[in-house]
Amino acid sequence: MSEVAGQIAAVHESYAFACMRCGHGWEQSYAIEHHTDTEGHECVRYVVGGTVVPSPLSRPVCENCDGHVVRIMRAGQVSAVRTPVPEAPAPEAHHWHLSDLLHPFQRRAS
């Protein structure tokens, strides 16, 4: 990227995110600006709505629960998952209770 008349060319990228903690999914578009610092080193800035934000690739944070275990995917993945799919009947679920787990450790009354 190069600066032209004081303006910086930006690349636009979009990513899909899914939180592995709460299951929340979202998509975000970024303007990715390439700059050269005063020492000649290239640096990259991610911009959303005119605000510089941290790179979504370094340590994404769930916008719903603030969790840090977030999967990053190509754009369109979240909306594809949200499309209704015919559901198969769910198998019967067993709900465990603490008493079920403690049963082997309980003493029998004499």
Image: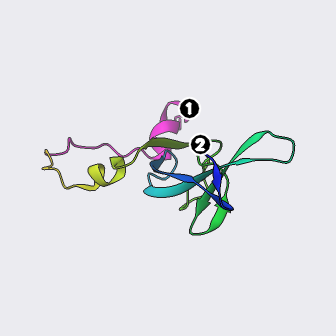
Provide the secondary structure element on which disc 2 rests: loop
Asked if 101 appears above or below 49 in the picture, the reply is above
Of residue 72 and residue 87, the one placed in the foreground of this image is 72
x and y percent of residue 71 in the render?
Answer: 49, 41
Amino acid of disc 1: Phe
Residue 27 at x, y percent in the picture: 43, 56
Inspect the magenta stretch and tell me whether residue 25 lies in it.
Answer: no
Mark carried by residue 105: 1
- Residue at the outermost top position: 104
- Other-residue count near label 2 (Cα within 10 Å), few / some / many at <14 / 14–19 / ≥20: few
Say if 57 sits above or below 5 in the image. Answer: above
Label 1 crowd bin: few (<14), some (14–19), many (20+), radius 10 Å: few
60 or 57: which is nearer to us?
57
Judging by the rendered image, the residue that carries numbered circle 2 is 57
Residue 94 tag number: none
In the depicted structure, whether residue 41 falls above or below residue 32:
above
* Residues in magenta, as a range: 89-110
First in sequence: mark 2 vs mark 1 = 2
Q: Position of residue 106 (x, y in %)?
A: 55, 36
